[in-house]
Amino acid sequence: MNTLLLIAARNLARNRKRTLLLGGAIAVVTVLLVLLTSLFNGTQASMLRNATTLSTGHVNVAGFYKITSGTAAPVVTEYAKLRALVEKETPGLQSLVIRGRGFGKLVSDASSQIAVVSGIDIAQEANFKNILEIVHGDVNRLSEPHSILIFEATAERLELKIGDNVTLSSQTYRGSNNSIDCKVVAIAKPLGMFSSFFAYVPLQTLRELYGLDQTTAGGIQLYLKDWEQAEQVAAKLRIALDKSGYRVMDHMDLPYWRKFDIVKREDWTGQKIDVTTWMDEDPFMKWTLFGFRALIVIIFMVLLAIIIIGVMNTLWMAIRERTREVGALRAIGMQRHTVMAMFVTEGALLALASSTIGVILGVAAAFALNAAHLKMIKGFQMVLMSETVTLLVNVPTVLISLLVIASVTTLGSILPAWRAARLQPVEAMHSSN
Amino acid sequence: MHMATTPAIEPIVHLSNVDKDYKLGAVTVSALKQVSLEIAPGEFTVIAGPSGSGKTTLLNLIGCVDVATRGEVIVAGQDTGKLSEGDLTRLRLNALGFIFQSFNLVGVLDAFQNVEFPLLLQKKMNAAQRKERVMDLLNRVGIAEYAHHRPGELSGGQRQRVAIARALVTFPRIVLADEPTANLDSVTGNQILDLMQELNREGTTFLFSTHDPHVVSRAGRVVRLVDGRIVTEPEQQSPMSHT
Ligand SMILES: Nc1ncnc2c1ncn2[C@@H]1O[C@H](COP(=O)(O)OP(=O)(O)OP(=O)(O)O)[C@@H](O)[C@H]1O
Ligand SMILES: [Mg+2]
């Protein structure tokens, strides 16, 4: 009934101060929520972009080769055949790169450190070149044999400059030790907490280190059009590979370099394929995002609770002030449910109007913050793999926020409205003013 | 009493041996005792009596906003003791009109919208029919020119005129009013009574309460309550004599 809406709107307008106070609070919470979720989306996007450049695709098809049951090499043999199959079986595939996987020690005259060493074909790595910020040297020189790219922290620790040699040593998969000298051709700016733990050499150099032939690779990193499909795509690929006669490993929630010991103890030999997602390969990022999301949920719950209490209080006051009016309406024949609808309408109208205003302000604020290119606090820069605050306004998230806030606050008006509906019409007969 | 009335006229209100008790903790207050009463169409009846005698209680029972402890209350042919809350509400909407001592209009609606409100609850008329009916009544109570004023912008007398129009808009069988003039000065109160009397002559049945002897003197029939009981006065031998 339009009149109920009219009554609700006019009562809100009449109690201007109260309405502005509560409506303002709802709007502020909405702004906060829009900003927080946009920050989350922005962070997630930049973390994912960086992480999937460094060490993982959205989905990875790799595996282990066991010559004897006591060894484990992160190697797939005849990768070309595997690649053809994966290209055919991956829905929504955007691009893929072949990577070599290694794990060893970098040794210089000054010092040494453990490193996850990837073998790459720099000619195929457009994204990699885009995202890494090279401070010294030239990333394209990774096409030269026995070259290496390291991050600044590694360069400092090992006291290395462009042109210096560093020894890369590792246990080969037959059990003996092997080492290769590589020339530093590029030094990159750090990209997240653990980037100093990574180094890059040409794929062929990595094969030499491990005594592998041309048909081998560490794995295939797949990039999807929609990264959110990663888990489904991985599951699909496991089935497809299994059907094509590959032995496929059970899903394990770990990055490959933490699987060596597990695979070594397993009692099988030959090739097994392991399909993983970015969440498996970068658990740190997974947990960072999870924590961030949990934080948002908690903050949001607290704010919502405050708002619900505010809505209830405000409606209580409104009902107390209008007891006689409500009693009169009940007396002249308004049913209980209509009384309830009258007050819920008031709550809903306030909630919807103020959260809509909040969304508009929040989105505007997000764009303004992006335009301002705010620098992140140092600690966060590392964790979140980004130097500036980037907010990504995502329409579905914003609409969901709007819906949640509006409906939860409306819900807050139901209890007082219900109590109002139980008011006796005799209240109206009381002569007191 | 008057069990044998003219068979053609069915009373709008029929109470027989009605008691109403209020429980206040351990104490039971007997607000009405053995009340029997009939109101026929066309009456202009006053319930008189001292404060605390049960006038409001009686109007509440007849107005279907409260139910009797014992006895039978029949309003517009319905035994109110047997109706659900929803049915009582519907009965109030369709058969009764209310005028309150403190007007009780909806503050944020203008005079027109206040009068229209019961019609909206009834959902029987379309917008054009409603407009015609509401304007008719606003004209009849003499405040058509204030149709778009809100109660806050009207005087007490004007507000009570709006309330009367609201009570009449649904063509109720009877209009109930608990001390409708108590919040008005005597001049305005008299004007309101004049209006009610005119409307009664045009066919509306009124039942209202008052303290005011002057108001009592204008009634067609007086029901006098003392201590929760109806007392019959010598001049009240024939309650329906005014018709
Ligand atoms: N809700 C209630 N709870 C308890 N007692 C009540 C209640 N309403 C009325 N009473 C008692 O019932 C008796 C009749 O009250 P009622 O209000 O009907 O009198 P009244 O004739 O309308 O009085 P007044 O002229 O002052 O309005 C009084 O003793 C009153 O105290
Ligand atoms: Mg009274």
Image (cartoon, rainbow, N blue to C red):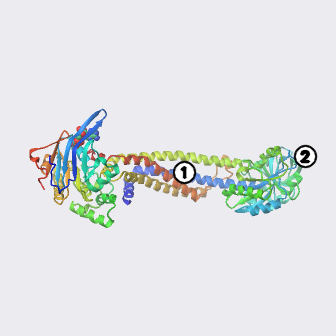
Q: Which residue occupies 57% across, 58% down?
A: A396
**Nearer the camera: disc 1 or disc 2:** 2
**Tag 2: amino acid:** Ser
Label drawn at residue A176: 2
SS type, badge 1: helix
Q: Which residue occupies 56% across, 46% down?
A: A299
* Residue A144: quadrant of the picture: bottom right
The front one of A30 and B129 is B129
**Residue A433: image x %, image y %?**
28, 45
The front one of A185 and B193 is B193
Q: Which residue occupies 19% across, 45% down?
A: B36
- Answer yes or no: disc 1 within 8 Å of ligand 1: no
10 Å neighbourhood of mark 1: few (<14), some, or many (≥20)?
A: many
On the question of residue A15 being in view, the answer is no
**Residue B241: image x %, image y %?**
11, 53
Residue found farthest to the bottom: B128
Vertically, is B163 above or below B16?
A: below
Q: Chain of mark 2?
A: A
**Tag 1: amino acid:** Leu
Evaluate if marks 1 and 2 touch, with contact meaning CB atoms under 8 Å apart. no
**Residue A157: image x %, image y %?**
79, 45
Which residue is the site of mark 1? A32
**Residue B196: image x %, image y %?**
18, 56
Vertically, is A194 above or below A83?
A: above
Q: Chain of mark 1?
A: A
* Disc 1 to disc 2, C-alpha distance: 58 Å
Point out the image quarter for the N terminus of chain A: bottom left
Residue found farthest to the left: B234
